[in-house]
Image (cartoon, coloured by chain):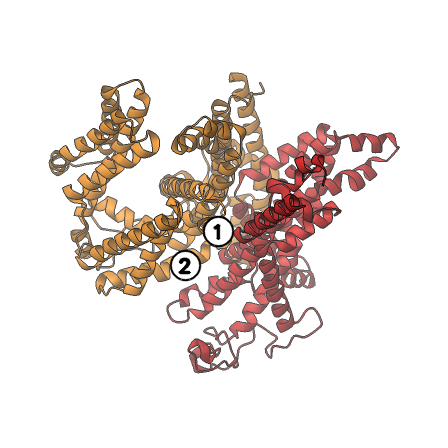
Amino acid sequence: MTAAQNSSPRPDDLSRGDNAIEAKEVEGLSQGQIVLRRFLRHKGAMSGLAVLLFVAGFACSAMGIGPIPGWWRFQDPNATHPMQNNGQPTLTLPEWLGGPGFTWGDHPFGQDNIGCDNFAQVMAGVKTSLLVMVVLGCTALIVGVTIGALAGYFRGWLDLCLMRVTDLFIVLPVIVVGSVLGKLLSQMGTKFDWPQDVVTAIKYNMPLILGIALGLILWPPMARLVRGEFLTLREREFVDSARVAGASHLRIIAKHILPNAVGVIIVNITLLMSEAVVLETALSFLGFGISYPNVSLGNLISTNQGAFATRPWLFWWPGLFIILIALCVNFIGDGLRDAFDPRTKRIPSVREMKKAKKAEIAAISQGEVA
Amino acid sequence: MLRFLARRFALALGTLFVLSVLVHLMVDTALDPLEDLRLSTSPNKATLIANRVAMLKLDQPWIVRYWDWFTQFIQGNPGIAWKSQQKVTDLMSGAIQTSVSLILMATVIALILGVLVGIVSALRQYTALDYSITFVSFVLYSLPIFWVAVLLKQFLAIGLNDYLADPEVNWVLVGVLSAISGLFWAGALGGDRNRKLLILGLATLVSFGTLALILTSGWLDKPSIGIVGIIVLGAASAVTVTLVFAGLANKRALYSALATAGLGVVLYYPLLYLFAFIPMNWGWILGLFVVAIGCGLGIGWLFGGSDRGVSMRGGAIVAIFVSVLIFVDRVMQVYPAYYNSNTIHQRPIATIGVETPNLGGDFWVQQLDRFTHVLLPTIALVLISFASYTRYQRGSMLEVLSQDYIRTARAKGLPERVVIVRHALRNALMPLAAIIPVDLVTLIGGAVITETIFGWSGMGKLFIDSLKNAEISPVMAYVMLTGTVAMLAALAADFLYALLDPRIKVAA
């Protein structure tokens, strides 16, 4: 080994100190791959994603999607069945948990006071919640990103209008606007004497309509963020060069700026969706959201809150699933935020640090020997 | 600055006007005042409908109804709730007070707790404590408030009342709680392994001992703080406040804090005589409170020295703490009588309503009664909003701690306490000015649900009930009031922010 090499055994500064492990790991990867790797390594987000997928898969396969029937024997959550064992849950714990052995039974989550199967109701409620969440997320995403992008890119009067409109939406609590909107949706058909089949159609597709309607009031924060992002990005050199190269406005927005803003958008839409789950259940609880014949978790809690002392299981299961869904989505959002944030550093564990130190010492002593 | 305020004010008024138009249109379309009559079977159905249509001007276009409402509203008359024929102003006067007390209390508690826990979480970043706090705040964030509220009502209240009626200590629960407290303190105070183990053991033992003493000595049947409690807690608060804000080396600050606590102890018996001989009201209490703060400031000023401000601040904080203790002690003294009164039926934790009807009693009994009623709704609201404050404060503290000037402060040899309290904390608290108004709006929304569940006749319940009853005037009054509050809060936040942060220039 020559003297020059000895004086600086590691020429690139990155391979020392805090960034050593990270710099080596991201060598030769694109931005997207780095983000994906970070996300896949985020334990909270991964467990959240796994649980959410499991819950969604379980509920959808139990109650069926669209024309495909599910595997659960009672497909109509509102059908009544003869009361078994005073409506107590037939689900029993396996032996290793101190129960009499795992059994599923006819009504694993019990029955309510008119004999409806609680399992079918909760699963249908989970499906409704997920549907509302996705529809709401998509609506808010489309509207928010479009308006935010246009306002941030073109500025001018559009921007001014947007800012005033978002002011308007931010003033009132979401639950208040949501209540009025929910009331409006459920009341419209009868009030304006619409034909019976339209009224029925609205009634049966309430989750879908409510999701769209709530999405239409929840987009402003999203639009604000996208606008802010566009305002800074549009001044960057790559936008200028695209413009000089003759790209149209639409092309610059969609192909050049939007991919750079995608991190903010994805993170915030996830957080919005977790908020949406709780919002929908709260509205249904107040009676301004989803009601009969559709089943919602909030609605289930609302109808059964009086029976808490006698039938607590009617209360525990829907609540458990609301928390589970919201928690999972929150964790996914947190993982995404960490993955997209360039400042996030992976903190190596104590063991990894020790290992790296040992390797370094070994390398140095080897160098000395050589 | 004046121009800025005027501009913002005009903008806020404009926004409120547009808001009123949009919401009125929406609510007017949503409500169906004829719903009950459509289903009615009475023979004079047609006349009834015609009468109501005429009364509510349903045959005229919406703009006429809006104009009627608007002209009335700007003259200070928000109309009447047509079903009950009550004036909206009458309905609201009591409701506002109820809601404000609930929301204010929840905001203050959530703010203090959330900020403290957030700071601890940031200072102990990437430790087990930090991860646990993060996890708990995520869970709280995902909790639907209505579920928590029903749970508190059906579980905590009934459980507590049952326990009070027939005290049988659940030692497992006590042990678990003590262990959690031990773990929290060990994580929060930090240090090397031995120190952590020592703190863990000590904190667990102290918590267990305190809980056991409270539960077995019959303290719950006849709670009080007493002169001994005030001496101990006052001295402890004086030392803690000095430790955090001035450092124990600053003798003047320590003595002024201790002297303030001592003054509180000396005034304990005279105050009890005062409370006994003069019927109290909130005017008196607030007056005494202001006097107490003045005393704290005065003592700090008298001890003087080169750094008067620090001593005065410490004295004032201790004065606040000790006066709250004396107040709480006096309220506790009426508890046995309250518990055994025949309107309470020995179930003191209330689940419904704002106050016990026909309770009677003096000022102190009423305060206790309010407390037992406000307890559960406040817990419900605090649980929800605590999480967002914690997350926010943690993030902002971490951001500040990674700044260069913090490294400079450490490099020039300042003690860690000074670095954190004087250099980091001040800047980390600033963004709160931006988050509080947003959170206030969320809390007002949360109060809608909490009030509905706990049967509090506040603004939120008024809104929900009126929406269900198809009465537009109270709904509009609620919307306008909430909108005004939110606007004012946002305005105040902008103003405060500009005052606090010299980097922000007010765009006039």
Which residue carries the number 1 mark? B131
Residue A321 image point, x, y percent: 53, 63
- In the figure, is residue A123 to the left or right of A252? left
Regarding residue A209, the answer to whether it shows in the image is no
Check disc 1: other Cα within 10 Å, few if <14, some if 14-19, many if 20+. Answer: some
Check disc 2: other Cα within 10 Å, few if <14, some if 14-19, many if 20+. Answer: many
Tag on residue B429?
A: none
- In the figure, is residue B171 to the left or right of A205? left
| Shade of chain A as shown in the rendered figure | red
Q: Is residue A297 above or below residue B138?
A: below
Q: Residue drawn at (19%, 51%), measured in percent from left and top?
A: B223
Q: Amino acid at mark 1?
A: Tyr
Q: Secondary structure at mark 1?
A: helix
Residue A227 image-quadrant placement: top right
Residue A49 image point, x, y percent: 61, 59
Which residue carries the number 2 mark? B150
- In the figure, is residue A239 to the left or right of B441? right
Q: Secondary structure at mark 2?
A: helix
Regarding residue A98, the answer to whether it shows in the image is yes
